[in-house]
Image (cartoon, rainbow, N blue to C red):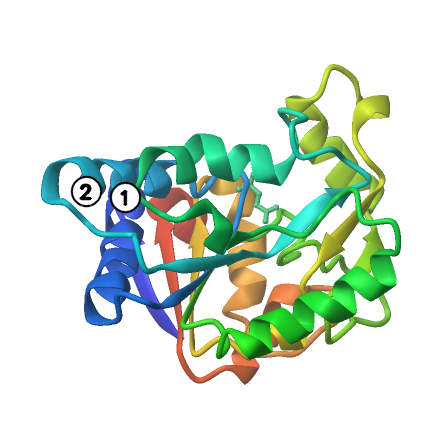
Amino acid sequence: MKIIVCRNYAEMSAESAKIVADQIKSKPDCVLGLATGSTPEGMYACLSTMHRDEKLDFSKVTSVNLDEYYPIAPDNDQSYRYFMNFHLFDKVNIDKSNTYVPDGTAEDPDKFCADYEKLIEELGGVDLQVLGIGRNAHIGFNEPGDILYPDTHLTELTPSTVEANSRFFDSVDDVPKHALTMGIASILRAKKIIVLASGKEKHNAVLKLLGNTLETKYPATMLALHHDVTLICDDAAYNG
Ligand code: PGA
């Protein structure tokens, strides 16, 4: 795994935005796998600025997002569709019809998940997948447990994730308890992966990620199976 340690969040955001921008410049019709959460917000802000000031061109880009709460409506301001529109899609010249976020209103979630896998395959796979990492080392909503799932699936959030994400909701009771998420194999099928981590509360997850074991109780450790992963983190996440 390649490791880039940045001084702070701003530098981590700029470094990761540069990697995404280089991907778009080298393949304008690339497929980006995108993530939500606090960590990539700065990266999206940098990409929006690069579009505005340097004419970084998203017009041929397609995006597929990692996950979405379930159930949730796309216009709910805590949905990941809303997040993506707000932080990136509304700020750049991407064609919204080429942006895919799992559908938190799907009537048949299992069918939706199977179709999402087919969609990614039909798009030719993800060229560059952006990931955050949970404090419990989850990736997407692949939560720690005895087993992990390979493909996109409906999952139940762990109490610790519900609690961590309650900061965005009025109360912990308002946090959806399920999510649709790409599975570990869906993530590993990306041609290239970057993992962003910031802050000392992610230090233990980063240690696990770099620990050179495969443990279902630390889902991010599965990234060791991929040949092109870059961790971009700040000093606090790296050194604690
Ligand atoms: P965060 O979430 O960026 O809000 O910390 C990361 C994650 O849970 O994957």
Quadrant position of residue 30: bottom left
> Is residue 123 in view?
yes
In front of the other: 34 or 63:
63
Quadrant position of residue 153: bottom right
Estimate the x, y position of residue 97 in percent, counting from the top left.
49, 50
Which type of secondary structure does the marked residue at label 2 adopt? helix
* Image side of residue 188 versus residue 24, left or right: right
In front of the other: 171 or 118:
118
The answer for how far apart the CA atoms under marks 2 and 1 are is 5 Å
Estimate the x, y position of residue 139 in percent, counting from the top left.
62, 58
* Image side of residue 141 versus residue 66, left or right: right
Which of the numbered marks, if any, corresponds to residue 184?
none
Q: Outermost residue toward the top? A: 170
Dot 2: few (<14), some (14–19), or many (≥20) neighbours within 10 Å?
Answer: some
Instruction: Determine the residue positioned at 32% across, 60% down.
Output: 60
Residue designated by label 1: 47
Quadrant position of residue 73: top right
User: Disc 2 residue type?
Assistant: Met
Q: Is mark 1 within 8 Å of ligand 1?
A: no
> Is residue 240 in view?
no
User: Disc 1 residue type?
Assistant: Leu
Work out whether 80 lies above or below 187: above
Dot 1: few (<14), some (14–19), or many (≥20) neighbours within 10 Å?
Answer: many
Residue designated by label 2: 50
Work out whether 40 lies above or below 64: above
Q: Outermost residue toward the left? A: 54
Which type of secondary structure does the marked residue at label 1 adopt? helix
* Image side of residue 25 versus residue 67, left or right: left
Q: Are marks 2 and 1 in contact (CB under 8 Å)?
A: yes
Query: Looking at the figure, which quarter contains the N terminus?
Result: bottom left
Estimate the x, y position of residue 144 in percent, counting from the top left.
77, 60
Instruction: Determine the residue positioned at 40% across, 50% down.
Output: 239
